[in-house]
Image (tube, helix red, strand yellow):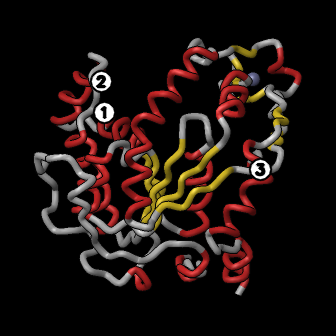
Amino acid sequence: MAAAIRRLRPSSFSFSFVTRSFSTAAAPETVKPHLYSQKPISPGVDPKNRNVQWVFLGCPGVGKGTYASRLSTLLGVPHIATGDLVREELNSGSAFSKQLAEIVNQGRLVSDEIIINLLSKRLEAGEGKGESGFILDGFPRTVRQAGILDEVTDIDLVVNLKLPEKVLIEKCLGRRICNECGKNFNVASIDVMGENGSPRISMAPLLPPSHCVSKLITRADDTEEVVKERLRIYNDKSQPVEDFYRSQGKLLEFDLPGGIPESWPKLLEVLNLDEQDEKQSVAA
Ligand SMILES: [Zn+2]
């Protein structure tokens, strides 16, 4: 499985396999959280001898989870979404899950320490099962988290998925859920001119089958006002994280050219990956 991937060629974009780089300038004073392991995951392992360790960034609605999940399947690495880690811990019935439930139920923010603990635990468990590499989704959210992450593992590459704000808003406003079967659809037919001379962006709607049409509902928080606010909050927090990784030479900016059919092949191209590789090796 993992043998199927073609290794990332650093020459294809400005990016280097930095093993560990502490950026004290960018990281604020941090209280070192207790970690499940004080030793780094995959300490000092040459990145050529292990699987990819990537982070996916992108604002809400950009489709980050979809691309991260597809790539993890292609590369044979786990797709680790911090939202899932929190949900799994809540359902685990562990002693800690009760504390966590209290925090979540009170609407309080799950702290960096808790998130990094869950993540360390997940990475260690994976390593124990022989997993190698990962694609992180939803983490790090802050520079502080990025700094802590640097202390426990080596990130090879950070992919920042981007869409113009007007596309994100249209996309979010087009979301519909079937009241009966729970499936997600999107009625927005997007066709906007790119910004700063970039090509036009088109996304076909994902229309429901006829039996769902009359049962479509819109999520209460998918209003233009809420979506804009969500993006504003995201951008405020993510800018410093992007700068953090940019200064390390690990940030790959990727402007999505459209929906999945347009974006997926382009994404594979910039990552120097080929879906054919996997198919061929399976057939061999
Ligand atoms: Zn339905």
- Residue 32 visible: yes
**Rendering quarter of residue 167:** top right
Packing grade of label 1 (10 A; few <14, some 14-19, many >=20) is some
Q: Residue furthest right?
A: 210
Residue picked out by circle 3: 198
Looking at the rendered structure, the secondary structure element under dot 3 is loop
Looking at the image, which is closer to me, 116 or 283?
Answer: 116
Q: Could you tell me the amino acid type at mark 2?
A: Val
Q: Mark 1–mark 2 contact, CB under 8 Å?
A: yes
Q: In percent of the image, x 54 and y 52: which residue is there?
A: 160
Per the model, the C-alpha gap separating discs 1 and 3 is 44 Å
* In this rendering, position of residue 206 left or right of residue 250: right
Looking at the rendered structure, the secondary structure element under dot 2 is helix
Residue picked out by circle 1: 90
On screen, residue 284 above or below 69: below
Q: Going from the N terminus, do you reach mark 2 or mark 3 first?
A: 2
Q: Mark 1–mark 3 contact, CB under 8 Å?
A: no
Q: In percent of the image, x 55 and y 82: which residue is there?
A: 3
